[in-house]
Image: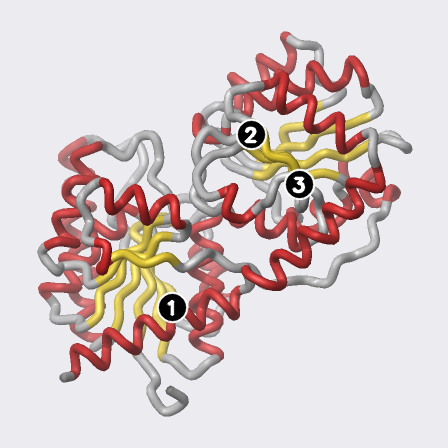
């Protein structure tokens, strides 16, 4: 394996601050460090990150400009065709051994082009479909897998693998490779840092949640739960790091419940790791999930977690061991679990240690990338025959 170095294109949908993007860039860095020739491409630059990412990474990064926000149908059609043209040129010039895509849209957009361009190994991934991913898209996706346009579909959880098979994918063409993170040293919590960063009063418990402000994250349920929590445990503060279409709606709910001094909507943050290092509990109220990087990172920082029983979350967290699991859409049960941790610092500490150990054993970038590398090499060798 040491002498077999592949030429790999990793392709995502949008340049943005999110879990799928972190997985892609972490994989790119690992493969590059381990001797493979890496190129990275995105369909479009949603958050204006292109220049910064180009300067930050040692491998080429391309913006295909295949989408533009708030453009009409004709103009958007033009951008799609131009993006396809850019991708075709990149694939023909790059002579790649492998193309791996990271979202439903990038799977559907890029892998047919890679198939036509003669790329030997074409890998799709399933990190969890969004609410607005139509049934037609998902049927088309499985059809491409059946026809061999995609050689393999990698699901990040067993639950997503099972769902793909129920929707018609052949079991032998779908495998599970969990996400992984780069473990960082656990810093000693600093109340002073939390107070300076977020103006959290001394002696307050600091709860943290990280994610886009969208339907899938069910933040209105978390806000309702905090309304219950503060009546019994007023010395606490919740910070939510992330932005999204529901921001105004969530702010109105916070104001309606008079929780302005208890909940902070932080928007997108570049210091999420600092926030995690100084938080006491990580909370996730989601309606649906794949394997969120924010959860893995919080556990990697030794945080006990309160999460809902959805998607692949139960595969990561054992109830009562690394954290507490509650039903989705239930603010009462969510509040009860949060209060249990707030009232028991020893339980918090033990669960936090267990969470860190769980990540060390099963969810590291090294473990994840070794599995991807073995899969890519096996498919490449098979195609060479």
Q: Secondary structure at mark 1?
A: helix
Which label sits on residue 285?
2
At 22% across and 59% down in the image, what residue appears? Answer: 173
Q: Please tell me which of labels 2 and 3 falls first in the chain.
A: 2
* Mark-to-mark CA distance, 2 and 3: 13 Å
* Mark-to-mark CA distance, 2 and 1: 30 Å
At 28% across and 76% down in the image, what residue appears? Answer: 378
* Mark-to-mark CA distance, 1 and 3: 29 Å
Which label sits on residue 372?
1
At 67% across and 45% down in the image, what residue appears? Answer: 321
Q: Position of residue 154 (x, y in %)?
A: 32, 57
Which label sits on residue 43?
none
The answer to which of 360 and 41 lies nearer the viewer is 360
Image side of residue 244 versus residue 108, left or right? right
Which label sits on residue 323?
3
At 32% across and 36% down in the image, what residue appears? Answer: 69
Q: Position of residue 182 (x, y in %)?
A: 59, 63
Q: Position of residue 322 (x, y in %)?
A: 66, 46
Q: Please tell me which of labels 1 and 3 falls first in the chain.
A: 3
**Where, quadrant-wise, is the C terminus in this rendering?**
bottom left
The answer to which of 232 and 166 lies nearer the viewer is 166
């Amino acid at each position: 394996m040491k002498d077999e170095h592949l030429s790999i294109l990793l392709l995502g949908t949008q340049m943005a601050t999110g879990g799928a993007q972190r997985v892609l860039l972490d994989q790119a860095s690992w493969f590059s460090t381990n001797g493979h020739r890496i190129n990275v491409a995105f369909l479009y630059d949603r958050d204006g990150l292109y220049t910064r990412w180009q300067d930050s990474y040692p491998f080429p990064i391309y913006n295909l400009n295949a989408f533009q926000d708030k453009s009409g149908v004709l103009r958007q059609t033009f951008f799609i065709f131009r993006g396809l043209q850019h991708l075709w040129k990149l694939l023909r010039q790059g002579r790649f051994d492998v193309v791996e895509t990271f979202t439903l849209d990038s799977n559907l957009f890029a892998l047919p082009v890679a198939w036509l361009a003669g790329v030997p190994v074409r890998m799709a991934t399933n990190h969890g479909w969004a609410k607005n991913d139509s049934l037609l898209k998902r049927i088309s996706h499985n059809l491409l897998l059946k026809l061999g346009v995609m050689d393999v579909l990698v699901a990040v959880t067993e639950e997503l693998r099972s769902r793909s098979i129920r929707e018609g994918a052949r079991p032998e063409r779908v495998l599970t490779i969990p996400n992984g993170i780069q473990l960082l040293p656990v810093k000693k919590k600093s109340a002073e840092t939390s107070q300076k960063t977020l103006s959290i009063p001394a002696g307050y418990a600091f709860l943290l949640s990280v994610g886009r402000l969208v339907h899938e994250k069910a933040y209105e349920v978390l806000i309702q739960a905090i309304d219950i929590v503060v009546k019994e445990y007023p010395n606490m503060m919740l910070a939510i790091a992330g932005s999204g279409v529901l921001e105004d709606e969530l702010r109105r709910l916070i104001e309606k419940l008079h929780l302005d001094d208890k909940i902070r909507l932080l928007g997108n943050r570049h210091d999420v790791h600092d926030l995690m290092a100084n938080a006491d509990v990580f909370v996730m109220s989601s309606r649906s999930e794949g394997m969120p990087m924010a959860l893995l990172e919080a556990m990697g920082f030794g945080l006990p977690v309160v999460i809902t029983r959805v998607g692949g979350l139960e595969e990561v967290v054992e109830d009562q061991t690394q954290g507490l699991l509650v039903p989705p859409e239930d603010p009462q049960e969510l509040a009860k679990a949060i209060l249990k941790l707030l009232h028991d610092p020893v339980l918090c500490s033990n669960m936090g240690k267990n969470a860190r150990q769980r990540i060390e054993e099963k969810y590291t970038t090294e473990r994840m990338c070794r599995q991807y590398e073995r899969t890519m090499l096996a498919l490449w060798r098979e195609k060479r025959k």
